[in-house]
Image: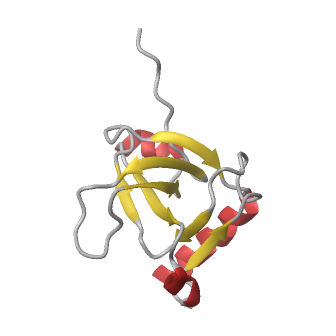
């Protein structure tokens, strides 16, 4: 019996190749932060994700990104900038994504607050 694949869930970081893309979308393999709940991912087969990059200076200056340092995840191995304005829905299983880490709940709250503000500014 083949091993059962883990269902991605909110606050988890997965490494995946997001190609094909076009324009200013992220190209190649990156870490992506899942912002949808695992129940929804399981039901629909896709996860809403945000890319993480080591660059992203302009997005930091525009206040549309959150920085992850070594203390931001349970493993401390994923660092960079979460691009909160680059929402993307992906089938992580079909793309062969691998689990990398879980984000600290306080950082996840900050990220979700920024995503909501970007979608519906008050």
- Write the residue at 51% across / 32% down: 6
Quarter of the figure that contains the N terminus: top left
* 107 up-or-down from 114: above or below: above
* 54 up-or-down from 71: above or below: below
* 120 up-or-down from 13: above or below: below
Work out whether residue 119 or residue 8 is closer to the camera in this orientation and state it.
Answer: 8
Work out whether residue 88 or residue 101 is closer to the camera in this orientation and state it.
Answer: 101
Left of 92 or right of it: where is 99?
right
Looking at the picture, how far across and down is residue 89, in whole percent? 36, 57
Looking at the picture, how far across and down is residue 41, in whole percent? 44, 45
Does residue 110 appear in this view?
Answer: yes
- Which quadrant holds residue 96? top left
Looking at the picture, how far across and down is residue 65, in whole percent? 56, 77
Number of numbered discs present?
0
Looking at the picture, how far across and down is residue 105, in whole percent? 73, 58
- Write the residue at 50% across / 86% down: 58
Quarter of the figure that contains the C terminus: bottom right
- Write the residue at 73% across / 56% down: 104
């Amino acid at each position: 019996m083949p091993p059962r694949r883990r269902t991605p869930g909110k606050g988890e970081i997965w490494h995946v190749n997001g190609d094909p893309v076009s324009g200013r979308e992220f190209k190649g393999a990156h870490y992506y932060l899942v912002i949808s709940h695992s129940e929804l991912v399981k039901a629909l087969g896709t996860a809403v994700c945000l890319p993480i990059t080591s660059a992203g200076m302009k997005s930091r200056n525009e206040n549309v990104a959150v920085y992850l340092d070594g203390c931001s995840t349970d493993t401390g191995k994923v660092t960079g900038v979460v691009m909160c304005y680059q929402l993307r829905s992906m089938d992580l299983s079909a793309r062969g994504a691998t689990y990398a880490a879980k984000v600290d709940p306080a950082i996840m709250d900050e990220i979700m607050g920024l995503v909501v503000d970007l979608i519906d500014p008050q």
